[in-house]
Image: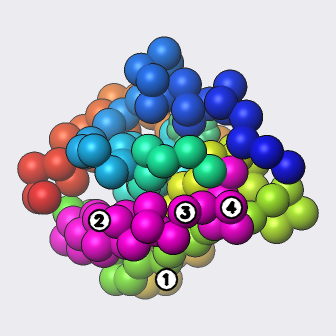
Amino acid sequence: MSYDPSNIFAKILRSEIPAHKVYEDEVALVMMDIFPQSRGHVLVIPKAASRNLLDADPAALLAVLPLVQKIAKAVKQTTGADGIRLAQFNEAPAGQTVFHLHFHIIPVYEGVEVGGHGGPKADDAELAALAKSIAATL
Ligand code: AMP
């Protein structure tokens, strides 16, 4: 299947719809997941267009991984999480719902079960505050 530029993350990358942005550079945009699986769930979205890992340019993957690490460390430090889960889904049967490559950074808290994929929408004020705190940690 080919890349469809009308997907929601492409619209966010073009600033056509709003997002709780944490960070942005020429390689990627980082934002809060509005249906978080835990407090502080962040998405790293490479700007290079691909549906997912399978059709991505290896150079784009190489460019984004250091940022994934940097954001994971900042999310852990900011939220006080005990661990970080990194997730990335490829095609619908594997759980992918938005068809522009992205990496989930999901904080894990000792004794707290991580929510399911596609849970309830988080409070906007809380997401805005988290985005600001993570950005300040970077
Ligand atoms: P995936 O299932 O891996 O494609 O993940 C897509 C993720 O994007 C899910 O975790 C959704 O909660 C999240 N999501 C969907 N729409 C938005 C949006 N407008 N802003 C932020 N996160 C979103």
Task: Say which element carries label 4.
Answer: helix
Mark toward the viewer: 4 or 1: 4
Q: Which residue is mark 3?
A: 57
Q: Quadrant of residue 49?
A: top right
The numbered mark, 4 or 2, whose residue comes first in the sequence reads 4
Asked if one can make out residue 32 in the rendered structure from this viewpoint, the answer is no
Residue 66 magenta-highlighted: yes
Q: Residues within 10 Å of mark 4 (few under 14, many from 20)?
A: some
What's the magenta region? 51-77
Q: Which residue is mark 4?
A: 55
Residue 15 magenta-highlighted: no
Magenta stretch, overall SS: helix
Give the residue at x 33% y 51%.
Answer: 27
Q: Which mark is residue 67?
A: 2
Q: Residues within 10 Å of mark 2 (few under 14, many from 20)?
A: some
Mark toward the viewer: 3 or 1: 3
Mark toward the viewer: 2 or 3: 3
